[in-house]
Image: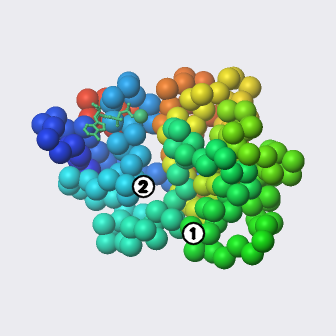
Amino acid sequence: MKEVSFTYRGNEKKVLNHISADFEDGKVCAIVGESGSGKTTLLSLIAGLTSSSSGVIAYQGKDIKHMNKDRYRSNKIGVIFQSYNLLLADTAAENVMLSIQLGGNKVKGKSQLAYVLLAKVGIDKEKADRKVLKLSGGEQQRVAIARSLSYNPILIIADEPTGKLDEKNEKGIMDIVRNLAHIEGKCVILVTHSASVTEYADVVMEIRNGSLSRR
Ligand SMILES: Nc1ncnc2c1ncn2[C@@H]1O[C@H](COP(=O)(O)OP(=O)(O)O)[C@@H](O)[C@H]1O
Ligand SMILES: [Mg+2]
């Protein structure tokens, strides 16, 4: 990100003010900041869900303004939202399969890939075939992670991925997240309130008064 600023329409105050930062492959970057400081706004800019008012956001050197937004969103980045955005009445496997299809890949019958991705985050076959509604919060978060991996993105962004979880599940999720960066070389950017989550991160940045600085 280079000199990125952002103001919501009809609002005078800049939420983000000339922010510059690099996010590297193979690392987990945690972004902290008070409630309302602009963390979610920053993630939606990176995800291309919102356009910056000024400045440049580049993905592998390419300005995302000049990229096909739908392809960028559905192929290049994995997004894990605060509210998991899972289809609760569908099974875990169906949720992952849907995402594989949205990424432009055909799924015939039951996708093995969906089960492989779910196994990777600790969801076995029996749970994969259960309706998401009948999984615990920690399990639902794992499904959301598996779904974000469906098209093997290099960049994974997560808004409070452990926000609703207890300590044990938080550790489980953060171990998965760290492995994605350290073993698979992905670039993980996550937003968190939790001081313990920042201990799993390689880089910690803080948003304050519209500025982003390394801690
Ligand atoms: N859609 C919106 N329209 C106007 N203002 C918004 C909108 N979304 C968030 N804001 C404001 O922008 C600021 C940053 O919000 P947000 O990025 O959600 O903060 P955080 O995720 O750090 O809690 C807050 O003051 C919030 O009220
Ligand atoms: Mg937020």
Q: Which numbered circle lies on residue 27?
A: none
Q: Which mark is residue 47?
A: 2
Where does label 1 land, which residue? Answer: 103
Seen at 79% across and 67% down, the residue is 110
The amino acid sitting under disc 1 is Gly
The spot of residue 156 in percent (x, y) is: 55, 52
Please say if 11 is above or below 197.
below
Residue 94 sits in quarter: bottom right
Q: Is mark 1 within 8 Å of ligand 2?
A: no
Q: Secondary structure at mark 2?
A: loop
Q: Label 1: few (<14), some or many (≥20) within 10 Å?
A: some
In primary-sequence order, the first of circles 1 and 2 is 2
Horizontal relation, residue 51 to residue 32: left or right: left
Evaluate whether residue 117 shows in this view: no
What residue occupies the far front of the structure in this picture? 89
Residue 85 % position (x, y): 55, 46
* Residue 93 in sight in this render: yes
Q: How many angstroms separate mark 1 from mark 2 (CA)? A: 15 Å
Residue drawn at (81%, 51%), measured in percent from left and top? 129
Secondary structure type for disc 1: loop
Amino acid under disc 2: Ala
Q: From the viewer's perspective, is residue 119 above or below residue 33? A: below
Tell which of 205 and 174 is nearer to you: 174
* The image quarter in which residue 170 lies: top right
